[in-house]
Image (spheres, rainbow, N blue to C red):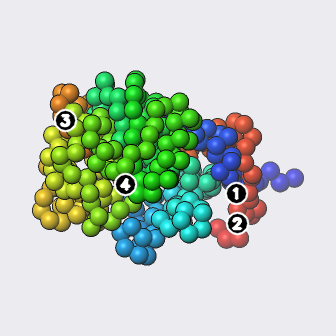
């Protein structure tokens, strides 16, 4: 009787509903994963190559972004986040702007472990990035939040800030569609039990805010946040593209980024670098360096800090691995067979 081991390859498929059931909406855990993935990347234990991008209609148009990454340490997982996006989707077809899928693989055999909806994972890790930033760069007595854009990105920003801010007394949100901002404010205020209100201008959202988050997809020629709007001692978290003017960024006491890649792509830092206004060597450092104690975070209550993190694949892959493990423990998902027997070896 043959005792040859099976050579079939199986993987787990997780729908968005499965991802949620496996902890996809657990912001505290998402923040833990993002913080540790920043740390591992800074230590050289993870790999974050430049993500290929296909753009179909200008900087704020349709695009497909691919984020390959390897997360080391005890995570030891390689994978890919695949994200097609069209900013017009909510308006034209009533569907999300972006649709993400995550694939994670065993780094030894290369065989796939899982393929899953990455839309929730991507949105949650985007919020978690600001949560991690606030831990190291925010003023501990911060109370007022200003959000620019009333969409999915703003939703997870507020979820993350609620996790890390001890006291929130006022949340202002501005959107170019006033009715959308009003509905968003009512929904999120009730959902998170926070005082959330829509305001009439971007300036009103920014002025007086201890934490400001740009959550839009404006193109470079639409930059609008002015230096005079930004409060002393504030944290400006830039997780979108081009909301802040160059002057607003350059007036900051500290500029913290997620890595040098920002200076090579045609948004924010890349555009400033192209004009010779800034370089990676001129910024305070990366958030990974601060987490690992190589550089200080906030050093005074008066510092204006600009924190720019435009998205790293290591965050998605770490969170995807967390969700995969939880799904296995709870019997979630559908097992798929890639092959029963390889046709060639």
Q: Residue at x 70, y 62 (%)?
A: 338
| Residue indicated by mark 2 | 342
Between 165 and 30, the one nearer to me in the picture: 165
Disc 1, disc 2: CB below 8 Å? yes
Task: Please state the horizontal and vertical placement of residue 85, each as a whole percent of the image.
Answer: 50, 65
User: Which quarter of the figure is the C terminus placed in?
Assistant: bottom right
At mark 3, the secondary structure is: loop
> Which dot, 1 or 2, sits closer to the camera?
1
Q: CA distance from mark 1 to mark 2?
A: 9 Å
Question: Does residue 225 appear to the left or right of 76 in the view shown?
Answer: left
Task: Please state the horizontal and vertical placement of residue 103, each as a whole percent of the image.
Answer: 57, 56
Q: Is residue 166 above or below residue 211?
A: above
What's the mark number on residue 232? 3
At mark 1, the secondary structure is: strand
Q: CA distance from mark 3 to mark 2?
A: 62 Å
| Residue indicated by mark 1 | 9
Q: CA distance from mark 1 to mark 3?
A: 56 Å
Q: Is residue 306 above or below residue 290?
A: below
> Which dot, 1 or 3, sits closer to the camera?
3
> Which dot, 4 or 2, sits closer to the camera?
4
Q: Residue furthest right?
A: 1
| Residue indicated by mark 4 | 240
Q: Earlier in the sequence, mark 1 or mark 3?
A: 1
Q: Earlier in the sequence, mark 4 or mark 3?
A: 3
Q: Earlier in the sequence, mark 1 or mark 2?
A: 1
Between 6 and 315, the one nearer to me in the picture: 315
Rate crowding at label 1 as few (under 14), some (14 to 19) or many (20 or more) other CA atoms within 10 Å.
some
Q: Say which quarter of the image contains residue 293.
A: top left
Rate crowding at label 3 as few (under 14), some (14 to 19) or many (20 or more) other CA atoms within 10 Å.
some
């Amino acid at each position: 009787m043959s005792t040859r081991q099976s050579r079939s390859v199986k993987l787990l498929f997780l729908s968005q509903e499965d991802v949620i059931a496996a902890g996809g909406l657990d912001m505290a855990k998402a923040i833990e994963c993002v913080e540790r993935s920043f740390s591992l990347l800074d230590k050289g234990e993870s790999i974050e190559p430049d993500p290929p991008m296909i753009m179909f209609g200008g900087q704020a148009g349709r695009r497909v972004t691919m984020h390959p990454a390897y997360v080391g340490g005890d995570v030891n997982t390689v994978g890919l986040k695949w994200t097609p996006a069209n900013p017009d989707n909510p308006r034209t077809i009533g569907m999300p702007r972006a649709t993400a899928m995550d694939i994670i693989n065993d780094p030894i055999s290369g065989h796939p472990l899982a393929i899953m909806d990455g839309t929730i994972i991507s949105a949650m890790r985007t919020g978690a990035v600001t949560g991690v930033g606030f831990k190291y760069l925010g003023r501990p007595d911060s109370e007022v939040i200003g959000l620019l854009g009333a969409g999915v990105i703003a939703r997870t920003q507020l979820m993350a800030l609620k996790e890390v801010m001890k006291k929130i007394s006022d949340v202002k949100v501005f959107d170019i569609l006033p009715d959308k901002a009003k509905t968003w404010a009512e929904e999120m205020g009730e959902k998170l039990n926070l005082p959330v209100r829509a305001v009439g201008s971007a300036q009103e959202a920014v002025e007086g805010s201890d934490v400001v988050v740009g959550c839009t997809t404006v193109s470079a020629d639409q930059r609008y946040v002015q230096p005079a709007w930004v409060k002393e001692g504030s944290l400006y978290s830039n997780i979108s593209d081009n909301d802040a003017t160059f002057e607003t960024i350059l007036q900051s006491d500290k500029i913290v980024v997620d890595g040098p890649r920002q200076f090579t792509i045609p948004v924010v830092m890349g555009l400033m670098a192209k004009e010779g206004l800034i370089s990676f060597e001129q910024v305070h450092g990366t958030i990974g360096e601060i987490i690992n104690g190589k550089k200080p975070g906030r050093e005074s209550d008066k510092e204006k800090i600009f924190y720019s993190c435009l998205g790293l694949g290591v965050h998605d892959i770490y969170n995807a691995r967390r969700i995969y493990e939880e799904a296995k423990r709870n019997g979630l998902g559908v097992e798929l067979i890639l092959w029963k027997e390889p046709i060639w070896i």
